[in-house]
Image (spheres, rainbow, N blue to C red):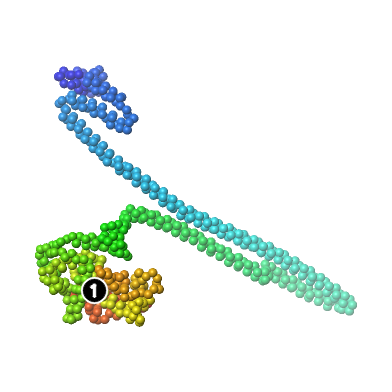
Amino acid sequence: QLSARGHWSTWPAFASGQTVLRNHKPCCAPEERQSSNKQALLTIPKPRYLEQLESYLRKELQSLDLTKKNSQELKLQPYREIFEFFIDNFKTYKPLLSAIKNEYEVTLAHQKKTIRALEPLKAMVTTVSEECTRQMLALQEKEKGEIKVLKQEKQHLLKFIDNMKEEKNSLQTQVEHLRTSVAEEYARYLDEYGARKLLLAKLNDMHNEQLDRARHQVQDVKGEDVVKLTLALKVARQDLTKAQVKLNAMIADYGDVVPRRDFESLEKKYSHLLREMKTLQKDFHQLRKEHETLLEIHRETAEERDNFCAELQRVQGNCTPRPNWAKCSDVIPGGADRWGCLAEGKTSDQLVDVLLEEIGTGVLKEINVFPGWGKGDNVPVYLRHEGEVKNKKLTKKDVVNILKDVWKEKIALEQQVWERSSLPEFFLGYLQKKYGDAAAMEWSYTLYESMRLCRSNHVLSSFYDILTGKVDEEQYHGQNQLISSLQKELAACDSSSSGSLTSKQAAVREAFPLKRSESIQELVDASRYKLDSTEDLIDYMSLFKEDAEGNAEPFVAKLRSQYVREKQEYLRQLKNKLGDLTEVTADDLKTAFCAIDPDLDDQTLDAYVGLAYGVRGEQPDQEAVPVETALERLLAGDVRRVGPSPREGST
């Protein structure tokens, strides 16, 4: 319905405005104007377009099936269509209304997207809740057995306590009964004692009467004097009165006294019953304490069980599954047999090193050239080269043979000149002398990369650590000296020179008197690594052999690992002796060394202190060095115990 100006009617706003203009009275009150406006609204009809829209909306809503799952979206569609009709008819406000509608549509789409994203989370929460419920039920089922056993034990203890209480009541009843019996016996004794006294009195009276009659008869016969008899009778009666008084006094004083024999018997019986009652009371208190202790232990055990269950769940959630190392046999050259030899007796960390070594060796064979490190001062002398260097692609066996030959030449040279030379410089000189200056760098780079990758091989890893300065060269010679001294000791024990011994424990103890019994047993077990019986002869010569790639037998490997472990233990004692010091002087080091190793001679002590200060054959400075730096230098060198520790010596 159009207004007078040609625009759409704003009913009821337009109608109310017209009504206000017509009914406006300046003098009327606001309440009266408001009531008149309401009456005018009721008389104005709705616009036709509004009625059509409302009718269309009612029809559409009635035709919908609101029982479906998406009934709300279906119900929203008619309102959306009505709003679109409304926008199309209002040309002036169409842009603003369209923007409002689009913003609402975008917001609804975003909310639907958010709901769809949250539905998997809801399912996951439901799954996790079910899993937690299942775990709780499993734990409850697991704990039912323990709770049942504890309840049975509790019932057993309660029954035992009840039995003890009943036994105590029974003993108390017996004591009361005995007390009643003693009282009755005592009363009967008093009655008998009184009757006896009366009987004695009657007997005395009868005896006195007999004596009186006898005296009267004698008096009659002899005609004695009556006065004399009267006096005698009077004296006798006085004596009788005194005796009676004395007897009454004794009865009064000793009327409640029982015979000693009965008293001692009753006292003995009472003491026996008292001891039994005290014993039962002591047992009862002990049982009650044990019961309280068991309840406390049960409470603590329950708390520990809950803590362990929580810790187990946390560990199970955080731990990773152990790798299946057998899968490596499919990618390692040589198959399962070679992988079995490589992985035998190794831990997971060592297996990772072996696997990385195999991968690195394979990659190294595919490299044709190495990039040069340059000629800077920070580059090792045996790697100073500009440009690319050819890869010789050596096998591990070739590298081991070359390094052994380097050690052999170096030791021979040092024995001639009696002076220790630098391994990096000697290594470069050896390669230049054997292969020439042009090819020396090719061999040096190839050997360096092979040593860097092959960490599981002792020959390569020890040479690499000494070459790079991580370990002092004296440690290498010290380990070889230990192995050589053990070989000589075993050969000395072999009187028949057969190369076999039945027991090496005495020989090992003779060669290493400072080793503990556990370490000696480890070496003996390592020597029997490939034997089926502990009584077979041991071929001690084969224990020191190496394969083509320089890998030693388990016996020598165990000896080297014990060398490192004993040195770490020795330095740990030194650190504990130094206490909380952050810096240490030469005098502090000497005092600590002498405290943990009293048999240390002055020359060795000076050598250890010089090693801690990083100087050789020189007097160390008096300046303090950090404790950690000194311990790291000592760990890299050949440091070992000379004599037994003070604690072991006193023991």
Badge 1 is on which residue? Answer: 476
* Residue at 79% across, 69% down: 202
Residue 152 lies, with reference to residue 45, above or below; the image says below
- Is residue 109 visible in the rendered image? The answer is yes
- Is residue 39 visible in the rendered image? The answer is no
Determine crowd level at label 1: few under 14, some 14-19, many 20+ residues with C-alpha closer than 10 A. some
Q: Please state if 99 lies on the left or on the right of 274 as rendered.
A: left
* Residue at 28% across, 31% down: 73
Question: Which sits in the foreground, 15 or 637?
Answer: 637
| Label 1 element class | helix
* Residue at 40% across, 71% down: 533
Q: Please state if 190 lies on the left or on the right of 80 as rendered.
A: right
* Residue at 46% across, 53% down: 145
Under mark 1, the amino acid is: Tyr
What is the count of numbered marks?
1
The C terminus lies in quadrant: bottom left
Query: Percent x, y for residue 46?
Result: 24, 20
Q: In which quarter of the image is residue 508?
A: bottom left
